[in-house]
Amino acid sequence: MFTGLSAFPLTPMNEDGIDTVAYAGLVRRLADAGVDSIGALGSSGSYAYLSREERARVAHIAVESAGTVPVMIGVGALRTRDVLLLAEDAQKAGASAVLLAPVSYNKLSAEEVYSHFEAVTRNLSIPLCVYDNPGTTNFQFSDELHGRIAQLPNVRSIKIPGMPLDPQEAKARVDRLRALIPAHVSIGVSGDWFGAIGLNAGCEVWYSAWGGLFPRALLEITRAAQRGDAQEASQLLERLCPLWDLVARQGGSLRVMAAAAELLGLVKSPCLPLPLKAIQGPDRAHLAELIASLELQ
Ligand SMILES: N[C@@H](CC=O)C(=O)O
């Protein structure tokens, strides 16, 4: 399951908690578009804002609605004990894999992160993807730590943030990591504007937030890269630059994705867990124009 496009849907909320109908619709839409896997409860799925019960509910709906498409469930939490419970819930829901970020409040040491992954993988019976996302966890993995964690049982993929923009430097980055991790562990790129460069540099999977909303456009890029058409993949991604510029201006994808989902009528407004809010004002109007002009669907 750790190849191609892994799409990360939003988790829409309403006044009662999870908007289960809208969520099932978002997941079915991804499965119908033909994504290779679905990443439920990633950062785009607001995992850090939800209770254990809400997360278990989301995991069940994701697996049920995805049909035959494998589902990976985010199980990150501050305490190892809570991660173990969340991983148990994900396995009970029928998840194909779990995604684990070293969530922190106090800055974690490399040894603490290693022990955390060691404890979780020891208790898992499904694959795990290591979620490297310093922007939200405040933890910077070294390549050496990735190499150590990748040797643990059940580790099958690493989701790395970003990529050098120069193709040769990107390839060197992937090659350096590849030399440290076993062949059965795939390397995935995230940060959507790096998708084509990462796949072209040898990443096997694109972990994509916007793939959770516009699967067809991002699948086109993924398939071009997979068939070796690096130029086509880069050009298709560059076409979306105005969207990436808007995301950069807003400091991340989540609030922009929420507004896009609301504009498309895929979720009701407001759809994010408070205090988060979808973008409003001129940038929201600009987003509506972009969705139309870029023919995103
Ligand atoms: N980081 C995103 C996915 C890829 O960009 C998420 O966790 O939702």
Image (cartoon, grey):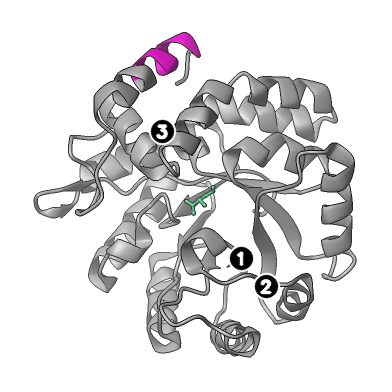
Residue in the foreground of this view, choosing between 106 and 160: 106
Q: Is residue 226 magenta?
A: no
The residue to which callout 2 is attached is: 155
| Crowd band around label 3 with a 10 angstrom C-alpha radius: few (<14), some (14–19), many (20+) | many
> In the rendered structure, are the residues bearing label 1 and label 2 in contact, judged by CB atoms less than 8 Å apart?
yes
**Horizontal side of residue 165 vs 60, given as left or right:** right
Q: Is residue 6 visible?
A: yes
Q: Quadrant of residue 90?
A: bottom left
Compared to 293, does 150 lie above or below?
Answer: below
Provide the secondary structure element on which disc 3 rests.
Answer: helix
Q: Is residue 293 magenta?
A: yes
Amino acid type shown at disc 1: Cys
Whole-angstrom CA distance, mark 3 to mark 1, is 24 Å
> In the rendered structure, are the residues bearing label 3 and label 2 in contact, judged by CB atoms less than 8 Å apart?
no
Compared to 145, does 130 lie above or below?
Answer: above
Whole-angstrom CA distance, mark 3 to mark 2, is 28 Å
Q: Is residue 214 visible?
A: no
Provide the secondary structure element on which disc 2 rests.
Answer: strand
Residue 212 location (% of width, % of height)? 46, 39
Mark sitting on residue 129: 1
Q: Nearer the viewer, mark 3 or mark 2?
A: 2
Pick out the residue farthest to the left.
Answer: 15
Sequence-first tag of 1 and 2:
1
Magenta-drawn segment? 288-294
- Which residue does the image show at 60% across and 43% down from the upper left? 36
Compared to 171, does 244 lie above or below?
Answer: above
User: Where, quadrant-wise, is the C terminus in this rendering?
Assistant: top left
The residue to which callout 3 is attached is: 29
| Crowd band around label 1 with a 10 angstrom C-alpha radius: few (<14), some (14–19), many (20+) | many
**Horizontal side of residue 228 vs 125, given as left or right:** right
